[in-house]
Amino acid sequence: MSRLRAPSPTLKRITPYDPRYLAAPYQMSANENPYDITGELRGAIDEALAQVPLNRYPDPLAKELRDAIAAAYGLAPEQVMVGNGGDELLFNLVLAWGGPGRHALVIPPTFSSYAADAIATRTELSEIALLEDFSLDEQALLSRLAEGDIDLVFITSPNNPTGKCVDAAFIAEMLQESDALVVVDEAYGEFCDKTAFPLLADHENLAILHTLSKAYALAGVRLGYLLAAPSVTSELTKIRQPYSVSAVDQAIGRAVFAHRDDFAAQTARIVADRDRVFQALTEMPNVTAYPSEANFVLFRLSEAFEAEEAWQALYEKGILVRDFSRTPGLANCLRVTCGNPAESDAFLAALGAFLEGGAS
Ligand SMILES: *Cc1c(COP(=O)(O)O)cnc(C)c1O
């Protein structure tokens, strides 16, 4: 007879992350880059991979990749940390600055990982919701920080799923008014021209997260990096999984990062497509589209329609978008990833047909 002792009671509060991936010809739900890496760069990656010894453990600190990232930003290598996707770095930040008896502040609606990581690590969670127009409640945030018990804050700029950037001047104010570690998640930073980066030089309590999953088309590889003071990265090295970034990931990361400037034209095309989708959505009756500085657009249907039904109608035409209608603050909202004009056209046509009540 086999029996199993119950796991940690913490798990009662957790439901597994479900991105609701479904096979669909038009994948517009996960904010991926719609263009896989091809051509010369793909060739360079293949060549680099052929040289990777598969029998040896990877370099735990990914020295070469980290040096390349540090050099690109004019930072010391000690100010850079790489991880198995941005997600791993976020988890490590909560492990290191959160935990039982510690307190994280998040600003919903936003990326769900921050709260999930806090719950998993038994970090106390405070939330200060975005205002109705999805801007920050600056006064509420500053007064909450002034209470002095917040250890860690997550700011997402541009925010996922609302698409709005946070003013660097306000981030500077938070950094000044508090000693909490302020994590600025710039996973979509390449799609806009705003960054908290200039604040890094003067603020030990700032950490900036980047990923290669979005603008750099490596979601399948799992690579992210953090820019922060050595006093932050040295703490993270105590709790990180030493071999989480494989030798294969590191080799691909080095090749792609070395060619990152080649992505500028593609990024500009993705941004142009996003602006076109936003414009088209604003012209549709019964749709409110929210301006975005990322590679997706969030939009809300009027009460005459159900977002879930729209989601279903799009899915039946092979178009997968993300349904946020059950997220507090995002009633009747869907999010569509942009970048491929043919996909965006199919999406706009299918949504238009749904709204007109037209079948097929
Ligand atoms: C996609 C995303 C990340 C990180 O993704 P990884 O694939 O784990 O690098 C981090 N933050 C936000 C807000 C994201 O949307």
Image (cartoon, grey):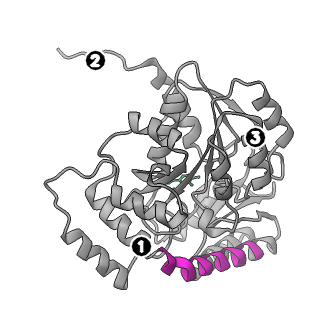
Label whose residue precedes the other's in the sequence (3 or 2): 2
> Which mark lies nearer to you, 3 or 1?
3
- Is label 2 in a helix, a strand or a loop? loop
Whether disc 3's CB lies below 8 Å from ligand 1 is answered: no
Q: Position of residue 330 (x, y in %)?
A: 73, 48
- Which residue is label 2 attached to? 4
- Which residue is label 3 attached to? 176
Q: Is residue 185 above or below residue 138?
A: below
Is 111 colored magenta in this rendering? Answer: no
Quadrant, the N terminus: top left
- Outermost residue to the bottom: 39
> 229 or 95, which lies in front?
229
Q: Position of residue 44 (x, y in %)?
A: 30, 78
Question: Residue at image x 64%, y 57%?
Answer: 197
Q: Amino acid at mark 1?
A: Ala
Question: Residue at image x 27%, y 61%?
Answer: 248
Q: Is residue 238 left or right of residue 349?
A: left
Label whose residue precedes the other's in the sequence (3 or 1): 3
- Which residue is label 1 attached to? 258
Q: Quadrant of residue 279?
A: bottom right
Q: CA distance from mark 3 to mark 2?
A: 50 Å
- Outermost residue to the left: 55
Q: Residues within 10 Å of mark 1 (few under 14, many from 20)?
A: some
